Image (tube, rainbow, N blue to C red):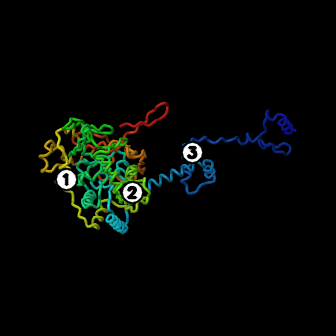
Amino acid sequence: MENDDVFEETLLNPSDRKIDPGCIVDSLVVVSDCRTLRPRKYSETLSQNDITKKIRAVVRQAHRSADDEIFLEQHESLVKLIESRRSSYDKLKERAKEVLDDPLILDVKVAQLTNILRASKHAIIYTGAGISTSADIPAYRGIGGVWTQLNAGHNVVMNRSLAHATPTFTHMAITALVKQGMVKYVVSQNCDGLHVRSGIPPANLSEIHGNMFAENCSQCSRNFYRVFDVTEETGLRRHFTKRFCDQCKGKLKDTIVHFGELSHPRWPHNWEQAESQAEKSDLILCLGSSLKVFRSYKKLWLTDRKKCLRPKLCIINIQWTPKDSQACLKINGRTDEVMENVMKHLNIEVKPYVGDLDPIFQLAVPTAQLGKYRSQCIPIPATFKSKFPEIDEAVYKEPKLENTALETSSAVNPPSTSYISDETCSVSEEDPASSLASPVLQIREGSERDLTSPSSVNIPAWFGKGRKRTKTKRGGGKRRRKAS
């Protein structure tokens, strides 16, 4: 039969002729070769990035299919890495939140802090940018902080000069505690000079990152306080203020410690006094600091001692700090509110700040070498205008609605000093959409800094605390180059 001939011929020469699938030959169903019926399907090759994205999408799903489970099993090591990173990011976001204690809990903690202060014989205070936020100086980290906005790629705008900021209630309360003898020493990482202006004697103060109103001679080491911002012409590794010493004609330099620079043991940083006071202390009170930079200064925490021999640690901050687990008391609150309650419990009167009695006018030395002005100085009262005749009234008159944008640059490393380790300070990664701007900060897309306008408010170079990071190709690979 015809079908028999076809079948026999096919068996003899299977590669010469093919039979249609399902062809019946003497009641036998001839099945085609599997490659002909079901050609092999090669899965699409996925790159590492595609696999990572797919794993992230699958991990986020509440219900997973059997194929998803098989896919995750095939990339078990990568899944563990992604889940670990996700957990770290969630923890970072949780720590970046600003938390305030319940009023009842706050009262209990304030009473505890009052008792600790009374029992202390040698208390010292470490302060950060958080104590100056009520003086219209934004903090660096946290919601609306300078670094948070710069990290998100925004330009930060300020509505007033830093020289017009005045000491807050916390500054004045610290001064009252120092004068009462309850606090022996203050170590600050702020550069705004408000501790000096609040009345703390320079002998009881270490400004470890410098003071925007202080400059010293590089030859004779004379120190000068000024009533204006001395950092207008300075920057990273450029500390010459374009002024010269009246005595030896040496170059005057600012005292600001930028990131990547070495700190100095001399005035106004006063490292030797800070370390000696830390050695004597039995209580460290931290106010308004995230401690992400402070923690790098090992000698201020006496880490070489046993834990039972270290001074007590109390922290007042609205965010998590890396020292929370070591603190005997952590108060989640704003420093002005907490210190106001503490001073009431201690029955210590806090005198308000009076501009005419600002100690900076007594400490400052007049100079005719003002240099190139682009910003304002401290408003000088009538009683001191004769002492500073070189200051023109138009210079320190505060503008009303002027804005200046900070350049988009961020910093993530603490200052490299001879007293600290090269520990990296991480910046909070927050969702830019959820960040609320500070009252004195505005976010403006595409804005540029105008240094030519005489009426614009100049922002000191140290306030950005950072350097632009650019990518350069060297030897075929991408390497990061730091530029000032």
Asked whether residue 432 is in view, the answer is: no
For disc 3, the neighbor class at 10 Å (few under 14, some 14 to 19, many from 20) is: some
Q: Nearer the viewer, mark 1 or mark 2?
A: 1
Q: Which residue is mark 2?
A: 319
The count of marks equals: 3
Q: Which residue is mark 3?
A: 51
Is mark 3 in CB contact (under 8 Å) with mark 1?
no
Q: CA distance from mark 3 to mark 1?
A: 63 Å
Residue 69: image x %, image y %? 62, 52
Asked whether residue 54 is in view, the answer is: yes
Looking at the rendered structure, the kind of residue marked 2 is Gln
Q: Which residue is mark 1?
A: 358
In the figure, 230 relative to 294: above or below?
above
Q: Which of 80 and 233 lies nearest the eye of the viewer?
A: 233
Is mark 1 in CB contact (under 8 Å) with mark 2?
no
Residue 14: image x %, image y %? 81, 35
